[in-house]
Amino acid sequence: MNSVINIFFSPTGTTKKVGEKISSSFKDNSVKQINLTSINEQEINLSSTDIAIIGMPVHRGCLPEIAIKQFKRIMGDKTPCILYVIYGNRDYGSALLKLKQLVSSQGLIPIAEGTFIGDHS
């Protein structure tokens, strides 16, 4: 394994905290952070030896459009990834499925998925 990359969209910081907790389980690897909350046009390429931890909040059962737009600058090369969504104890709708479809279209391979309840804002 090359690097663990914690990729998140987290306007309130909750999604970031969950990603940091997940990435902390990879004790012998360095962890890089990619904050999609900040607007950045730079394309990021991941390798097949990286592992990505990808988290997004859920708004009304969907992923935020700005988060999807920001994620589209990430390109994988059969990069394994762990996916999670944060929702406000209502319903995460199709958000996790949409995140899986999004990362797959960008060259990443989901190996685990999860949902977590967080502060609703």
Image (cartoon, rainbow, N blue to C red):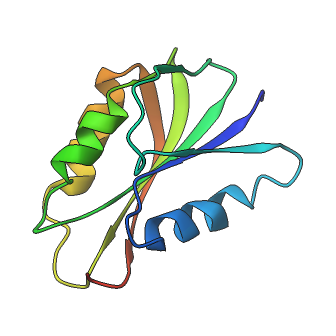
Question: Above or below — where is 50 with respect to 83?
Answer: above
Q: Position of residue 109 (x, y in %)?
A: 45, 29
* Image quarter in which the N terminus is found: top right
Residue at (82% x, 43% y) in the render? 30
Q: How many marks?
A: 0
Residue at (33% x, 37% y) in the render? 70
- Image-quadrant location for residue 59: bottom left
Q: Position of residue 7 (x, y in %)?
A: 51, 45
Residue at (62% x, 18% y) in the render? 48
* Left or right: 121 as drawn, with respect to 1: left
Residue occupying the far right of the picture: 28
* Left or right: 50 as drawn, with respect to 96: right
Residue occupying the far top of the picture: 77
Question: Above or below — where is 87 with respect to 101?
Answer: below
Q: Nearer the viewer, residue 32 or 80?
A: 32
* Left or right: 49 as drawn, with respect to 111: right
Question: Above or below — where is 82 with respect to 48?
Answer: below
Q: Nearer the viewer, residue 8 or 110?
A: 8
